[in-house]
Amino acid sequence: MEDLEMSFWQGKRVLVTGHTGFKGSWLSLWLKTRGAEVCGFSLEPESSPNLFESLGLGGLVDSRIGDIRNLELLEQTLQSFQPEIIFHLAAQSLVRRSYREPVDTYTTNVIGTINVLEAARKTSSVKAIVAITTDKVYENEERDFGYSESDRLGGFDPYSNSKACAEMAISSYRNSFFSDGTTLIASARAGNVIGGGDWSEDRLLPDVFRSLIFGDELVIRNPNSIRPWQHTLEPLNGYMLLAEKLFEGKTEFATAWNFGPDEDASKPVKLVLEEIEKNWDGEVEWKISNGDHPHETNILKLDSSRARAKLGWNSILTLPESLLMTIEWYRAFRDEEDLVKVTSDQIGEYETKRCR
C-alpha cells in the first residue's frame, strides 16, 4: 500500500476553499500539522457551534472570508497568496436545502467551481487542483453495487445535479485551458463522511449529537436508507495523496476519482443509530418523520477499486471504529475538553494506523 508522504507538505502553499466548513476545517488543521502554509477562502461558518471556531483556525491559517461566486475577490486572493495546490471544497452541500434554494445551489456549485478554475488559470503558481464533488453525481439506479468513475453522470435533486454539472465544467476546463500539463486538475467524489465537529443541518450524525448534547428532538426520515459511511479522514487522505501525484506532474491522475469505504461500511441508518447508542452514555431517542419529503436516494455505494489500484489508497477504518472516533469527539465537546488536542490526536492516530 502506498501511503501519503507527509513530509511532502512541508512549506507547500495550499489554498483551501470552504475552510470554515466541516471537511475544510479538518483538512486545514491536518495540512498545518504537516507544515503547509494554508490560506482559506470561504463564507463565515454557518452553524453555532462550528468546527472552525472550536479549533481556533482563524488564528492558524490565512483566513479570507468571501463568496466563491465573487470572481474578482477570488482572483485577488490567488494573486496575493500564490498557491501551489488548491483544494476546492466550498459548496452548497445539502440535498434538502437544494430543493428550497435551487438557484443558490447551482450558482455556488457550478459558477463557483468555474470561478475557482478561472482564477487558477490566471495564477501561474498553481500546479495542482483537487476539486471535491460528491458520490451523488451519478445517475442513480438504486442498485446494490457501487458506481465507478466511468458511470453516467446525472443527479436527481438540485444538489446532486449541480455537482454533476460541476464535474462537466471541470472536465471542460481541463481540456480547454490546462491541457499542456502545467497545471493538473482532478475531481474527487466522496460522501456521507462522519467525524467530530459536524453541526450541519439535515445530516444524521449532527442531528443525533444535537439531540444527545442539547436535547433537540431527533427525527429520522428513513431508518432503512443505506449510505457509504466513512470517517472524514479517509477521503481527505485520498485528496492529499491525489494532490501529491498531480503536483509531481503525473498526468494520468488528472481525472475523476471515487473515495468510498469498503463494502461492509455501507449500512442502513438504523444500524448507525444502534452503534452510537451502544457506545454513548445514554439512550438515543428518535422518531420517524411522517409526511411527504423531497426525493432522496435510498441506496448509494461507490466502487473505489481504481483508487486502490492506481493511487494505493484504501479505507483503513471500520464503521465501528469511525463511529467510535466520532462519539469520542462529541463527548469531548460535551465535557469541554481541549478540542484542538482531541482533533490533532485523532489525526495523529490515523496517520499511525496508516503506517502500520
Image (cartoon, rainbow, N blue to C red):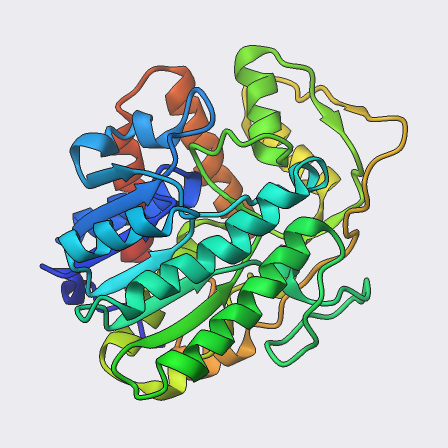
Residue at 81 percent of width and 40 percent of height: 294
Tell me if residue 346 comes above or below residue 341 in the rendering.
below
Q: Quadrant of residue 153?
A: bottom right
Q: Nearer the viewer, residue 126 or 138?
A: 126
Q: Position of residue 301 (x, y in %)?
A: 67, 63
Q: Residue furthest left?
A: 11
Residue at 42 percent of width and 63 percent of height: 131
Quarter that holds the N terminus: bottom left
Q: Is residue 356 visible?
A: no
Q: Residue furthest right?
A: 291
Q: Nearer the viewer, residue 100 or 176?
A: 176
Q: Quadrant of residue 130?
A: bottom left
Q: Position of residue 95 (x, y in %)?
A: 67, 44
Tell me if residue 127 comes above or below residue 20 in the rendering.
below
Total marks in image: 0
Q: Position of residue 93 (x, y in %)?
A: 56, 45
Residue at 33 percent of width and 32 percent of height: 52
Q: Quadrant of residue 8?
A: bottom left
Q: Residue furthest front?
A: 72
Tell me if residue 58 comes above or below residue 333 in the rendering.
below
Q: Is residue 177 visible?
A: yes
Q: Nearer the viewer, residue 2 or 9?
A: 9
Residue at 19 percent of width and 40 percent of height: 61
Tell me if residue 258 comes above or below residue 67 in the rendering.
below
Would residue 149 appear left or right of 88 to someone viewing this image? right
Would residue 122 appear left or right of 1 to someone viewing this image? left
Q: Nearer the viewer, residue 355 or 104?
A: 104
Q: Position of residue 81 (x, y in %)?
A: 15, 53
Would residue 49 appear left or right of 184 to someone viewing this image? right
Quarter that holds the C terminus: bottom left
